[in-house]
Image: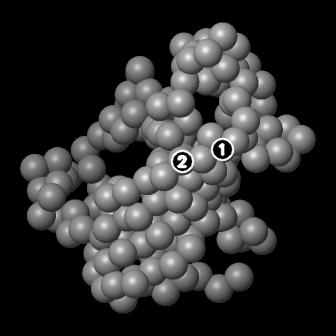
Amino acid sequence: MPKKAQGSGHATRYVRLQKNFCFGCGKNNEQGMRLKFVYDEERDSFVCRFRLSKRYSGPPGHCHGGIIATILDEAMGKVNKLRHVVALTKQITVDYLKPVPLNKPLRVESREVSVRGRKHVNMAEILNQKGEVLARGKGLFIAIDPHRMFAKFVER
């Protein structure tokens, strides 16, 4: 598939931050989830395969709902890379469809829904090994100027 065009409403390029301490994907955050996403061109989506340890417990044997929302938010945020924008979450909705188990192979997939100016709407789903959707999220992201917001954290 052809590469996505740059966002029409806010032409920002990624900046290289000194260290990524993001809870969801930061490799420098020892307490974080360290999720790693790959872009699947065939499906036009980002995919991450993972297992959740008991550290993320909610109900016995299952994941805490806040962690589920975090994974969906992280996955949806990755979609903005297709348009080379830095965008922050303004709103997220989560449908918890089935309990998300601990210590089982899972994946999250995310894709773009629409873009209007600086507003990016994305969606994501957490699936089990059988392909059943366990949770679904939809998010509104607002493109920002990373040079202004992150100026003191940028490598020079």
Q: Nearer the viewer, residue 77 or 127?
A: 127
Three-letter amino acid code at the position of disc 2: Val
Marks 2 & 1, CB-CB < 8 Å contact: yes
Could you say where residue 80 lies in the image, as x and y percent from the top left?
A: 45, 67
Residue highlighted by disc 1? 135
- Measuring 53% from the left and 59% from the top, which residue is drawn there? 138
Q: Secondary structure at mark 1?
A: strand
Between marks 2 and 1, how big is the CA–CA gap?
7 Å
Residue highlighted by disc 2? 94
Q: Nearer the viewer, residue 50 or 15?
A: 50
In the rendered view, would you say 51 is above or below 20?
Answer: above
Q: Nearer the viewer, residue 15 or 126?
A: 126
Q: Is residue 148 left or right of residue 137?
A: left
- Measuring 76% from the left and 47% from the top, which residue is drawn there? 133
In which image quadrant can residue 112 be found?
Answer: bottom right
Total numbered labels placed on residues in the image: 2
Could you say where residue 149 lies in the image, as x and y percent from the top left?
A: 15, 58
Could you say where residue 146 lies in the image, as x and y percent from the top left?
A: 22, 63
Q: Is residue 139 left or right of residue 147?
A: right
Image quadrant containing the C terminus: bottom left
